[in-house]
Amino acid sequence: MTKIAPSLLSANPARLGSAVQALTRAGADWLHWDIMDGHFVPNLTFGPHILKAIRPLTDLPFDTHLMLSHPMKFIEPFAATGSNWITVHIEADDDPADMISLIKKCGCKAGLSLRPQTKVSRLIPFLPMIDLVLVMSVDPGFGGQPFQKEAIARIAELKDLIGKKPVQISVDGGITDITAPACRLAGADILVAGSYIFKTRDYHTAIERLKK
């Protein structure tokens, strides 16, 4: 079954802890953290101390997405927070192979993400090294953007390239009960959803709609 990873970027920062506990009770599979540096993307979000403070409140896996120009400096600090998955961008300034190696050295599963404009073929040399590919279906940096339908073809292309390799496909951006079915059919294993879940108080129903 498709996993649902609510994005905490859309949560009320003043009630982050209670939101995490509510999502855990509501049936979320992972929790997605968008880490932004104000440089790679024009926004600032969570630091390692936030994830460390939240970690005792839930047993759900932390899916940590580093939207940073220089992720190498932050992989170890975020791994130390209890992150289970750490995803970096292939467009970052650091070498992808070095980033993947460090993530795994820290005991985390490694992911690579790509912006909507980046060719899927850039991932080919790294597919044997990683555990996850994160397809951005919006331009990274802000929540609430509309889904870019071109992502469907990109997911399908990745599915073919991955073949039988043990690499999961995640998709992030504009995920709703309308866009989720096409993503699943194209081959997505994980759906990252922020605004769709947090705009309602009934997290359980929203999550179940995305799964079905």
Image: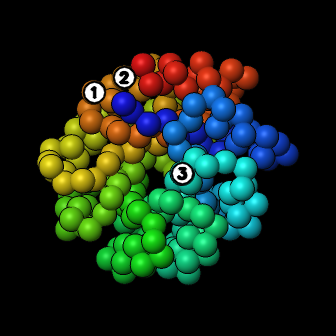
**Which residue is labeled 3 in the image?**
61
Q: Which mark is residue 185?
A: 1
Spot occupied by residue 8 in the image (x, y as percentages of width and height): 65, 45
The alpha-carbon separation of the residues under discs 3 and 1 comes to 24 Å
Contact between marks 1 and 2 (CB within 8 A): the answer is yes
What is the quadrant of residue 83 in the picture? bottom right
Query: Is there any visible trace of residue 137 in the rendered image?
Result: no
Density class for disc 3 (Cα within 10 Å; few <14, some 14-19, many ≥20) is: some
Going by the numbered disc 2, the residue's amino acid type is Pro
Query: Is there any visible trace of residue 35 in the rendered image?
Result: yes
Secondary structure under tag 2 reads helix
What is the quadrant of residue 43 in the picture? bottom right
The alpha-carbon separation of the residues under discs 3 and 2 comes to 23 Å
Contact between marks 3 and 1 (CB within 8 A): the answer is no
Secondary structure under tag 1 reads helix
Compared across the picture, whether 79 is left or right of 97 comes to right
